[in-house]
Amino acid sequence: MSEPLHQFEIHRLLPLHIDGIDVSFTNSSFFMVMAVVATTVFLVGGVLRPKIVPNRWQAMTEMTYGFVAELLDETMGFKGKKYLPFIFTLFMFILMGNLIGMVPYNFTFTSHIIVTFGLAMIAFGMATLIGFIRHGFHYFSLFVPKGAPVYMLPIIVPIEILSYLSRPISLSVRLFANMMAGHTMLKVFAGFTVALGIFGIAPLAVNVLLTAFEILVAILQAYVFTILTCIYFRDSIHLH
Amino acid sequence: MPQLDASTFPSQLFWLGVCFLALYFIMSFLAVPRITRVLETRENVIDEKINKASLYREEAEALLADYEATLAQAREQAQERYKNVSRETIRDISQRQREFLDKLTDQLHLKEQDLYRARLEVSQELKPFAADLASSILKKLTGRQFKPDQLLFKKKGT
């Protein structure tokens, strides 16, 4: 029985060092590039020959765009329109990473805490940046809830700051844990299937169901990551 | 657990940054503008068609109103003409009737005159016979001879 965590190992494909730091092109990097390529092909290919009445591909592209645009509109309103490319990039990158990872033998880069943390920091950093650009130092009023009694502020403000700073951690751990747990479970049941021989049909059936469930989780987690980022953006734009 | 192998972190973060940035630029300069343009084009086409449709409907409504007005006018004209014609016809009929009646009266007068004249003539012609008859009756009764002319004059005298 092969090791369930073996699938998360990183192999160097092209060794590369910049300034003494190891930035080799690995299997993780390869699937990140694949996610970028897949997203580009999916989105641009759908509207390469646009029609008034869309075909299936174009309809899929437009629906994906519409889904993200609506999400943005619901959370941020018209002020959020200019952040559409960023949110769309975040959503498609995570979604494609999750979905490509569902294909057997593929690597899932979103199952690495450092990648999801990097993504969360990009989203969190962007939200904080927008907040400071829009409101300057007034952005700190985000930590002072409206209507809170003054004598409570010494307790509330540190809590607010802590919860604010824990945003990227919760964001990254949620995605990472979901992806890693799902893939590990799939691998464990696949191992049972091999080990049990003819009786392996039972874990195989479980694996079929789990695969469907994991595809749902892949889409759902990309959605959750995106909508939480949208909510953080809204806080930065409207300050509660 | 391979996820905790910190030696892979720089490479993963580096490539994450590269890929995310690349995708961001592809999104903002290629994918999103294209999709937006497609959606806008569709919206424009639909708006245009709706406008055209409402224009056609207005035209059709104007045409209908025109048709109804023309129909009403024609009906009025027809009624007017019918009234005129019937009035003329009635007038014509009554005039002809009167003319016919006048003619009839004239002819009746003429015929009456003729008749009167004829009766006079007949009575003139009858006079000698009547005198003769009277004289012969008188002769039979009285045995006297009266001349018919005498009788005639006597009768005329009385």
Image (cartoon, coloured by chain):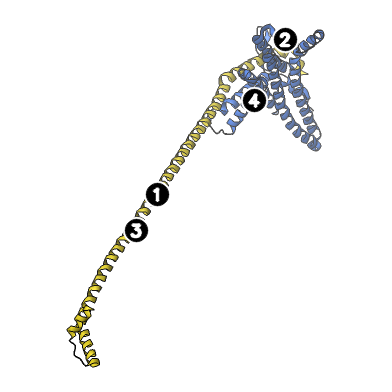
Chain colours: A blue, B yellow
For disc 2, the chain is A
Characterize the local packing of mark 1: few (<14), some (14-19) or many (20 or more) Cα atoms within 10 angstroms.
few
Tell me: residue B155, above or below residue A71.
Answer: below
Determine whether the residue tagged by mark 3 lies in a helix, strand or loop: helix
**Which numbered tag is attached to residue A199?**
none
Q: Which residue is mark 4?
A: A70
Q: Nearer the viewer, residue B11 or A168?
A: A168
**For the N terminus of chain B, which image quadrant?**
top right
Residue A14 quadrant: top right
Name the kind of residue labelled 1 in the image. Answer: Ala
> x, y (%) of residue A161?
76, 10
Tell me: residue A155, above or below residue B95.
Answer: above
Q: Tell me which residue sits at (21%, 88%) in the image.
A: B135
Q: Which residue is mark 3?
A: B94
**Which numbered tag is attached to residue A141?**
2
Name the kind of residue labelled 3 in the image. Answer: Ser
How far apart are labels 2 and 3 at the CA level?
108 Å
> x, y (%) of residue A113?
74, 17
Would residue A35 be visible to someone looking at this image?
yes
Would residue A24 be visible to someone looking at this image?
no
How far apart are labels 2 and 4 at the CA level?
28 Å
Q: Nearer the viewer, residue A232 or A171?
A: A232
Q: Which residue is mark 1?
A: B78
Mark nearer the N terminus (3 vs 1): 1
Q: Closer to us: mark 4 or mark 1? A: 1
> x, y (%) of residue B25?
59, 17
Q: Nearer the viewer, residue B83 or A86?
A: B83
Question: Pointer 3 and pointer 1: residues touching (CB < 8 Å)?
Answer: no
Q: Tell me which residue sits at (68%, 15%) in the image.
A: A238
Name the kind of residue labelled 4 in the image. Answer: Glu
